[in-house]
Image (cartoon, grey):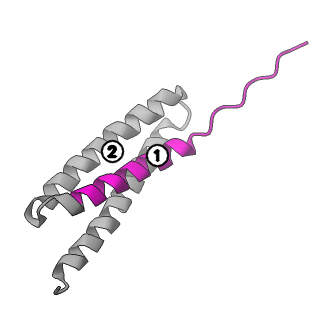
Amino acid sequence: MATPELAPRRTFAGVIVVWVVAALIAISVGAFVPPEWRAAWLATGLGGSVLLSFAVQLSYGRSQGFTERVAASVLGALVVMGVISLGFALASIVPA
């Protein structure tokens, strides 16, 4: 009797993890960093998201679709961080 092959793990969860971490980084940068330093810290946070994306996707151990998964993770992190930073930018120009 042949043993059935195991189904590969879902890789989309790793992409979502990177997006959630990017959102947490952007929110913490927007809340705790002065406005003149936000761009530098957001770029640093995006760099951390790129490294996290590589680490998460390499931990799956699958070479098929690696580039697409990393690209989706990084592009999604960029969009998430951009939308959150846009919200903080709009909030800073509204008079209190």
Residue 53 visible to the viewer: yes
Left/right placement of residue 23 relative to residue 6 reads left
Q: Quadrant of residue 56?
A: top left
Numbered disc 1: secondary structure = helix
Q: N-terminal of the two: label 1 or label 2? A: 1
Above/below status of 4 relative to 25: above
Q: CA distance from mark 1 to mark 2?
A: 10 Å
**Stretch in magenta:** 1-29
Q: Position of residue 32 (x, y in %)?
A: 18, 58
In the picture of the structure, the residue carrying the numbered disc 2 is 49
Residue at the far bottom in the pictured view: 95
Amino acid marked by disc 1: Val
Q: Position of residue 96 (x, y in %)?
A: 17, 85
Above/below status of 26 relative to 87: above
Q: Quadrant of residue 70?
A: top left
The question of residue 6 being in magenta is answered with: yes
Tell me if label 1 and label 2 are in contact, CB under 8 Å: no
State which mark lies toward you, 1 or 2: 1
Give the residue at x 45% y 50%.
72
User: Quick one: 58 or 26, which is closer to the camera?
Assistant: 26
Amino acid marked by disc 2: Ser
In the picture of the structure, the residue carrying the numbered disc 1 is 17
The question of residue 60 being in magenta is answered with: no
Q: Badge 1: few (under 14), some or many (20 or more) residues near its Cα, within 10 Å?
A: some
Q: Position of residue 45 (x, y in %)?
A: 25, 49
Above/below status of 60 relative to 65: above
